[in-house]
Amino acid sequence: MDAGLFCGLAGRLKCVLFALSFLFLGYPAYAADTTTPTKSSRDVVLVGDAVCTKCHDEDQAYPVLRIGKTRHGVNADARTPTCTSCHGESEEHARTGDDDHPQPPDITYSVMNSAVPGAERVQNDISFAPSPASERSAACLGCHEGSSRMFWASSAHSNRDVACNNCHQIHTGDDRVRDVQQQTELCFGCHKEQRAQMHRPSHHPVPEGLMGCSDCHNPHGSAGTKQLAKDSVNETCFQCHVEKRGPFVHNHQPVTEDCAICHNPHGTTIAKMLKARPPFLCQECHSHSSHPSQAAALPDVRASSSRQLGSVGRGCLNCHTNIHGGNSTENSPTAGRFRR
Ligand code: HEC
Ligand code: HEC
Ligand code: HEC
Ligand code: HEC
Ligand code: HEC
Ligand code: HEC
Ligand code: HEC
Ligand code: HEC
Ligand code: HEC
Ligand code: HEC
């Protein structure tokens, strides 16, 4: 509504002034509060970075300005951090930065302690001890709590002092852990046992770069065990192996319970990532009576007996072909035995 409508003729000049002040002074002040902040002339890449970038630049052993090219450098986004969002106000540090013995910033991550490739080669003249893992992660969680990090606090990584920067690299556009091809090596760095398993003859195509650990794991923690991407082992597998979900007319109890009873998803020396070769795999459970309990033997002239067939080729699977569940509707008491 036009402010002028409320003005008598006598007060017209005053009114015009009032309207002008509203339009040209009041409104811009209001606008400054809601639109995104803009860089001042001395800021280099992030809003308000001048206080730090007067000393830190791209020429250092560990160049910092490349952050301007990452998602953290999108200044048009009001949620974008500045140096002090992650490193703390660090006033003492900035004040003493030129001294012989500068005070450390409030939060230090230390390149040596992070995912930076070749970090061991980055040598600063002066180096500060990294802040405790919980403080380093807390700086990030201020903006990144929730969503896929909902279970971070109770995760094995957080409990064993693995911090965000052990996996994520901030001052570069190439965050290795988010690239399926490069992620595996990073995880292997701490998980030697899985490295060995993944290089066994039967494995998921992870070393080949077609899948990443994060297809099955949420390294930020999860509601289920072992930081699995879904709430259970089976739900995690069903993401890709939907045909194993069923429903089947005849279910095999261990299959509905946990795929990892028979398979090691990281890899094994036996085909199909099986933990043991049939008949031994099957005999871990089926050994009470009849042919399932018969000792393995090489086939002889009468090689048609189930005893011998159970130990050649696919073993018990020569006959029990549908081991994950059968849909036979044959009206017979033995129909449900995963033979088709
Ligand atoms: C007056 C110069 C100066 C200013 C201003 C300054 N620094 Fe530093 N900073 C240094 C020096 C010198 C070092 C020692 C390491 C090196 O050789 O780079 C250092 C080291 C650091 C380190 C590495 C710590 C480690 O070992 O992990 C971080 C992080 C850091 N500064 C952040 C900041 C931040 C954030 C600001 C702004 C609030 C800032 N600095 C302002 C001079 C300065
Ligand atoms: C989103 C969080 C974040 C922001 C914003 C950020 N940093 Fe960093 N900084 C880190 C992390 C994490 C590391 C550890 C190395 C890495 O992951 O890249 C680091 C490393 C450093 C280092 C080297 C530390 C060492 O060990 O030598 C310096 C210096 C530094 N930052 C300064 C700055 C300056 C200056 C700014 C502003 C232009 C800034 N940082 C903005 C998170 C941040
Ligand atoms: C002041 C808020 C703030 C802080 C502190 C912060 N971030 Fe971010 N971060 C953002 C915003 C905003 C984005 C971009 C929007 C989004 O992806 O949600 C982002 C994006 C990211 C992304 C995705 C990048 C991409 O390319 O999609 C990662 C990974 C990330 N941050 C990690 C970290 C880590 C690790 C720290 C601590 C060292 C940290 N952040 C600290 C605000 C923050
Ligand atoms: C053990 C390694 C590891 C640690 C530790 C880690 N992350 Fe991640 N992060 C990943 C991987 C892997 C992805 C990619 C996930 C994907 O593509 O499904 C990711 C993705 C992200 C993303 C972008 C996608 C998303 O889920 O929103 C953000 C933001 C992020 N991490 C923040 C953090 C923060 C904050 C911390 C510390 C509290 C942290 N991360 C700790 C490995 C890690
Ligand atoms: C195809 C899915 C899948 C992929 C890919 C995968 N994992 Fe796993 N991982 C699992 C399952 C399922 C378990 C739980 C096994 C169990 O309960 O016996 C597990 C367990 C683990 C454990 C805990 C082991 C223990 O005994 O406590 C670690 C550590 C692990 N995985 C690391 C990795 C790493 C590192 C990668 C990438 C190199 C990776 N995983 C890739 C499915 C997968
Ligand atoms: C800096 C070292 C480090 C890195 C890097 C790392 N982890 Fe871990 N991880 C650990 C530690 C320590 C544990 C807890 C002890 C253990 O089970 O070995 C752990 C545990 C796990 C577990 C078992 C969780 C549980 O609840 O038992 C899984 C799964 C896992 N990590 C997956 C990953 C994946 C996937 C990556 C890469 C995206 C990764 N880790 C990168 C150190 C690391
Ligand atoms: C992100 C998708 C994905 C997830 C999740 C996944 N797999 Fe797989 N799986 C694959 C791919 C891709 C192959 C390889 C198919 C090929 O080589 O033809 C495969 C192959 C297999 C094979 C056969 C290997 C062979 O030698 O033929 C088994 C057994 C298997 N997966 C079990 C599992 C189990 C158990 C889980 C859950 C812990 C799981 N998978 C989760 C994608 C996945
Ligand atoms: C009782 C042991 C057992 C359990 C539990 C089990 N499997 Fe299997 N799985 C096998 C055997 C044995 C084979 C080899 C079949 C063959 O050689 O024809 C196999 C083969 C596979 C294959 C490759 C061949 C195919 O049929 O596609 C995939 C994929 C697979 N299993 C996924 C799963 C998933 C997903 C689960 C959990 C829902 C699971 N398995 C649970 C025993 C099991
Ligand atoms: C972890 C234990 C376990 C393993 C390993 C296992 N099974 Fe089973 N199996 C069971 C259970 C439990 C039942 C349900 C028994 C029942 O209903 O009496 C079952 C049922 C069966 C049945 C149907 C029995 C009936 O009375 O209808 C057949 C056939 C069978 N399994 C074959 C196999 C074969 C072949 C293998 C190896 C590839 C195998 N099982 C591995 C636990 C296992
Ligand atoms: C030559 C085909 C054949 C082979 C090989 C075979 N089975 Fe069977 N199995 C059958 C048939 C047919 C039945 C149903 C008739 C019956 O109950 O005797 C059956 C029934 C079963 C049953 C349920 C009844 C019982 O006897 O307990 C189980 C469990 C079983 N098989 C497990 C196995 C295991 C474990 C192996 C490998 C050591 C195996 N089978 C090898 C054909 C075979």
Image: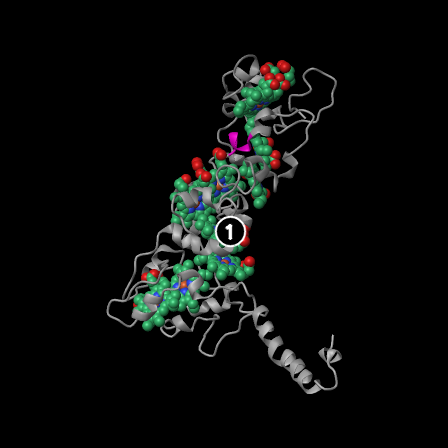
Mark 1 residue element: loop
**Magenta segment includes 27:** no
Residue 316 visible in this rendered orientation of the protein: no
Residue 53 position within the rendered picture, expressed as x and y whole percent measured from the top left: 40, 72
Relative depth, front residue between 293 and 194: 194
Residue at (42% x, 64% y) in the render: 84
Residue at (48% x, 29% y) in the render: 276
On screen, 18 above or below 264? below
Relative depth, front residue between 301 and 247: 247
Residue 286 visible in this rendered orientation of the protein: yes
- As drawn, the residue found furthest toward the left would be 100
Badge 1 is on which residue?
A: 145
Q: Is residue 247 left or right of residue 307?
A: right
On screen, 282 above or below 53? above
Q: Disc 1 marks which amino acid?
A: Glu
Residue 251 position within the rendered picture, expressed as x and y whole percent measured from the top left: 64, 25
Q: Is residue 61 left or right of residue 34?
A: left
Q: Quadrant of the N terminus?
A: bottom right
Residue at (69% x, 15% y) in the render: 333
How many discs appear? 1
Residue 172 position within the rendered picture, expressed as x and y whole percent measured from the top left: 45, 64
Residue 280 position within the rendered picture, expressed as x and y whole percent measured from the top left: 49, 23
Q: Quadrant of ligand 9?
A: top right
Relative depth, front residue between 257 and 323: 257
Range of magenta residues: 258-263
Determine if the C-beta at disc 1 is less than 8 A from ligand 4.
Answer: yes
